[in-house]
Image: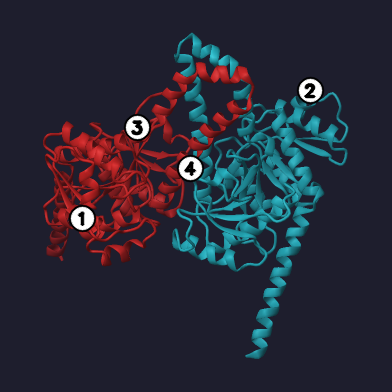
Chain colours: A cyan, B red
Amino acid sequence: MGGDHAPEAIVAGVAKARDQYPELEFLLYGQTDQISKLLTDQTRIELIQADEVIGMNDEPVRAIRRKKKSSLVMAAQAVKKGEADALFSCGNTGALLTAGLLIVGRIKGIVRPGLLSTLPVIGEQSGAFNLLDSGANAENKPEHLHQYAILGKYYAQKVRGIANPRIGLLNNGTEPHKGSKMTQETYQLLQADPAINFIGNIEANTVLQNEADVIVADGFMGNTLLKSIEGTATAIMHLLKKTIMDSGVSSKVGALLLKPAFKQLKAKMNQAQYGGAVLLGVKAPVVKAHGASDAETVYYTLGQIEQMLKEQMIPDLVEYFSNLNQASENTNNAANKEK
Amino acid sequence: MGGDHAPEAIVAGVAKARDQYPELEFLLYGQTDQISKLLTDQTRIELIQADEVIGMNDEPVRAIRRKKKSSLVMAAQAVKKGEADALFSCGNTGALLTAGLLIVGRIKGIVRPGLLSTLPVIGEQSGAFNLLDSGANAENKPEHLHQYAILGKYYAQKVRGIANPRIGLLNNGTEPHKGSKMTQETYQLLQADPAINFIGNIEANTVLQNEADVIVADGFMGNTLLKSIEGTATAIMHLLKKTIMDSGVSSKVGALLLKPAFKQLKAKMNQAQYGGAVLLGVKAPVVKAHGASDAETVYYTLGQIEQMLKEQMIPDLVEYFSNLNQASENTNNAANKEK
C-alpha cells in the first residue's frame, strides 16, 4: 500500500511478475477490498487484510514496535517465520529498513547491514555500478565497509552476473593514504582480504565511469553521493528543457529532431531498470522501490528479487560468514591452546 | 608557473586584470625570461626569478618546507611579510593550501581553515552558491563548521553582495536530528548563533536549487559533493554529445539548430565566471584557480581577489574573531571572579 501510485502500480507490477515468473507466489498485505478490485486473476496471489497503517512521516522504530497490524510488520513477520522468502515495499524507507533489521534480522556475523543501490554508468560504456551503503546508516566503522565489500560482491555476482566484481572505496583522492582515519583503515582491510578484488580508491567525479562494479562508502557519504548524482542529473535535464523552451522556433524544431536522442539519453540514465535498493546483511532479500515507482519499475524490482532467490544469494552469504566466524574461532582456540 | 596552460594563460589573465583594475599591482614569481617574453607592458607588474619548482605530484608539506626558492614559497613569504596582500596559483592545490596554512597563517581564533568553492545554481533560478569546506580537510569537528558558517557568510556578503546570506548544513535529511553525531552537534551550534542566518539542513539533491547561499560541510563530504556534481554534469554532457553523434542525420541537424541553446546551457553551468577556490580563515586571500584555467578564468579569479581586498573581507574577519575571543575571555574572567 506504500508509494505514490499505490496500490495500482504495485498490483499491476505484481500481476506482470506473476505471469513472467511461474516459481513466484505473492502475499499482498493491505486493504484487501481495494487490492482485489485491481486483480482479474488471483493465481499465486494471496491477499491479507492489514488494519493499521504506517504513514510516510511515522518515526520508524516506534511504528514498527507499535503498529503490529500494519502491512509492513505483518509482511516482515511472515518472512521471519519462513512463510515468505523476501520483503518488498514502496513505502516508508526508514520503516522498511527497521523492519528488516529488527524483524527479519541480521545474518549471523554481520555487524551492520547496509543499503545497496544500483546506478547507471554514464560514461563511455554502458552498464551499472552498485553503491553500498547508500543510506541505511549515518555513521560506519571500517569493519562495516569491509563487510559491505563482501555483500556487494555477492550481489554483483548473483544478480548482475559479474564473475569477479571490482570493488572500489569511495575516497577524496586515489592514493592509498587518502581520506579520513576511517577510510585509511578500510583501505588496509580491503587490500588485505584475498576474497576481495579491490581496485583501490575511487573519487566521486569518476564513479560514473565504470571503474568499479561495487563502490563501498559509509552511509552518510554514500547517501550524499547518490542524492547529488540524482539531483544534478535532474537539474541539468530540467535546465536543458527550460533553455530549449525559452529559445526561438529553430531551437524547438531542433528539439523535435533530437527527440529520439533525448529519449535514448533518458533511458540510459533511468535507474528503474535495475530494480530497487536492497538492505544487504539480513536473512532475506529486503527491497525498497522508489516511492514514485510505476508498475514497470515494480515489475523490474520483483525480477531483481527473483534473481536473488534463484541464485541463492542469502544462503551463500550465510555460509560465507559462518565459515569466516568458524575460521576466526579456530584461530582463537589455537592461540588459546598455545597459551 | 603552475597549471596546464602556464605561464601563457596566467600572464594573459594578469595583463587583463592589470588593465581593468588600476589599484592592483602584481608580483609574478617564476621563470622571468619565459614570463617577460609574454608581456608587452610591465606597468604594475614585477617579475621575480624563482629557481626551484614544486611539481604537481610533490608531497605538499615537504615541498613547502624544503623548496624555499620555489615561486609558491617565495610568493607566500611576500604575503606573510606584508609585501603582498593576496596569493594566487593554478598549480599544486595541496601545496597552495599548505603554504596558506603554514606561511600566511591562520587568523587568530580560527581553528581550521577551509576551502570555499562557488558552484552555479542550475534550478529554476540563476545564481550561485558557496560550499565550505570543499576539500581542505579530510575530517572536521562541529566547531570548525560553525566557523565555516561565519567565514562563508562574510565571503557571500563581501564578494557576492548578499546582505543576509542564508546558511545551510549539508545533511542526509531535513529534520534537525538527522545525520551523524558531528552534524547533529553542528546543527545545534548554528541554530544557537544569532550571527548566522541558519536555514537548516540541505540535502545533496537540492543543493543546486538556490535554497541556501552558503552550504557548510566537513571537507570530505564537501569534496565528495563537489566532485560528484562536476563528474555527473560532465558525464551527462558527454553522453548527450555521444548520443547525438551516434544518431542519424536528422539528429545532427537538430543539434545544429540547438547549438545556441547548448551554448547557453554550458555558460550557465560554467564555474569559471565565479573565480577560484578560496582558503578561508588565513590572514590574506589565498586563491586556487583550476589547473586547466584559461586566461579568462585567471582574469575572473583576480577580479574575485580584488573584491575581497576592496571590501576589506580579511580585516573584518580578523576583527570579528578578535571580538568573539574578547567576549569569551570576558565571560571566563567574570566566571573566575565569581569563584
Determine if marks 4 and 3 fall on one subunit: yes
Q: Amino acid at mark 4?
A: Ser
**In which quadrant is the C terminus of chain B drawn?**
bottom left
Q: Amino acid at mark 2?
A: Lys
Number of residues whose C-alpha sits closer than 10 Å to that of mark 2, classed few (under 14), some (14–19) or many (20 or more): few
**Mark 1 to mark 2 CA distance (whole Å):** 75 Å
- The answer to whether B82 appears left or right of B87 in the picture is left
Where residue B211 sits, quadrant-wise, is top left
Residue beneath disc 1: B76
Number of residues whose C-alpha sits closer than 10 Å to that of mark 3, classed few (under 14), some (14–19) or many (20 or more): many
- Residue located at (59% from left, 27% from top): B245
Q: Secondary structure at mark 2?
A: helix
- The answer to whether A115 appears left or right of B273 in the picture is right
Seen in the picture, residue B258 relative to A169 is either above or below; the reply is: above
Q: Secondary structure at mark 1?
A: helix
Determine if marks 4 and 2 fall on one subunit: no
Residue beneath disc 3: B128
Residue beneath disc 2: A37
Number of residues whose C-alpha sits closer than 10 Å to that of mark 4, classed few (under 14), some (14–19) or many (20 or more): many
Q: Secondary structure at mark 4?
A: helix
Residue beneath disc 4: B228
B265, A328: nearer the viewer: B265
Please tell me whether mark 1 or mark 3 is closer to you in this view. Answer: 1
- Report in which chain the residue with disc 1 lies: B
